[in-house]
Image: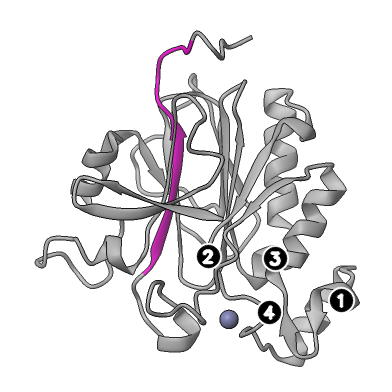
């Protein structure tokens, strides 16, 4: 489930249950959010609107954007090793283990996975389309997050954003073959000719012992009036899933 929120004039969505975590900022943008951009901005903006970031209280220079390649590279961002500003690092997942850093994943049909560990204040973001899911990018990223932070799988909260769902995601035989080749349980994650990205990613989380999952339940193709769907409209526009912790210690949730 997702709840509607607003920052300044910008409406956006947030995962129910994750909005109460102290210091945690997260947002999933929609067509309505992007529609609030100043009109002069390009049709395919490479980053979230500056005015939206400002309204959220996220400094643009602290926002790490990725060069997404439908692969399984995971970028780890720690306080001691902030990424340089020489372009976007090529990665489809990021782990933020230091408050004060933010990241955002862009999608239009692919699944965005958001993970948060409230006590250690660690965040993970994953871009999981059919290729990334086949390469188990979600499992790889969250295993990395757990290792880096020392968090237990049961302390992790995971949100599944809007994506194309099994109601609409008919794929070719080559996709099923790719999954079979990598040892996925194809009988579980395909229904007829349709790929179930949610089921496939749930299975990866279950294998890690992560069970606290908040699913938006939203299909970008069914709800094309609210979301961009690359498959449906071949659009260059994207939604953003943004997350991070504000800097500074919370007395309720001190760092260990
Ligand atoms: Zn659908």
Is 228 left, or right, of 110 in this rendering?
Answer: left
Identify the residue under disc 1: 186
For image coordinates 61% across by 85% down, the residue present is 168
Residue where numbered disc 4 is placed: 166
In terms of secondary structure, where does tag 2 sit? loop
Mark 3, Cα crowd under 10 Å, few <14 / some 14-19 / many 20+, is many
Which residue position holds label 3?
198
Q: CA distance from mark 1 to mark 4?
A: 13 Å
In the rendered structure, are the residues bearing label 3 and label 2 in contact, judged by CB atoms less than 8 Å apart? no
Tell me if the residue at label 3 has its CB under 8 Å from ligand 1: no
> What segment carries the magenta color?
238-250
Check disc 3 and report its element: helix, strand or loop: helix
Q: Is residue 201 above or below residue 121?
A: below
Residues at circles 3 and 4 in contact by the CB criterion of under 8 Å: yes
* Residue wearing tag 2: 162
Secondary structure beneath dot 1 equals helix
**What residue sits 38% from the left and 72% below the top?**
226
The residue at 40%/63% (across/down) is: 239
Q: Earlier in the sequence, mark 1 or mark 3?
A: 1
Residue 62 seen in the figure: yes
Q: Is residue 122 above or below residue 44?
A: above
State which tag comes first along the sequence, 3 or 4. Answer: 4
Query: Residue 40, image x and y in percent?
Result: 9, 66
Tags 1 and 3 touching, CB below 8 Å: no
Q: Is mark 4 within 8 Å of ligand 1?
A: yes
Name the image quarter holding the N terminus. bottom right
């Amino acid at each position: 489930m997702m709840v509607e929120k607003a920052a300044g004039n910008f409406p956006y969505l947030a995962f129910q249950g994750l909005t109460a975590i102290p210091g945690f900022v997260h947002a999933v943008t929609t067509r309505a959010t992007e529609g609030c951009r100043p009109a002069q901005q390009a049709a395919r903006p490479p980053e979230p609107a500056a005015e939206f970031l400002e309204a959220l209280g996220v400094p643009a220079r602290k926002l790490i954007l990725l060069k997404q390649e439908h692969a399984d590279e995971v970028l780890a961002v720690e306080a001691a090793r902030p990424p340089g500003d020489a372009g976007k690092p090529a990665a489809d997942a990021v782990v933020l283990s230091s408050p004060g850093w933010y990241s955002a994943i862009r999608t239009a049909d692919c699944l965005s996975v958001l993970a948060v560990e409230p006590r250690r204040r660690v965040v993970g973001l994953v871009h999981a389309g059919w290729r990334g899911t086949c390469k188990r990018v979600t499992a790889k990223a969250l295993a990395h997050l757990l290792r880096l932070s020392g968090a237990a799988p049961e302390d992790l909260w995971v949100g599944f954003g809007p994506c194309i769902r099994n109601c609409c995601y008919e794929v070719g035989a080559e996709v099923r073959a790719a999954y079979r080749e990598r040892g996925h349980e194809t009988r579980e994650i395909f229904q007829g000719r349709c790929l179930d990205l949610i089921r496939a990613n749930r299975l990866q989380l279950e294998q890690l012992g992560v069970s606290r999952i908040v699913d938006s339940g939203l299909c970008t193709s069914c709800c094309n009036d609210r979301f961009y769907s690359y498959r449906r409209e071949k659009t260059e526009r994207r939604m953003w899933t943004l997350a991070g912790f504000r800097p500074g210690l919370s007395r309720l949730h001190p760092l260990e």
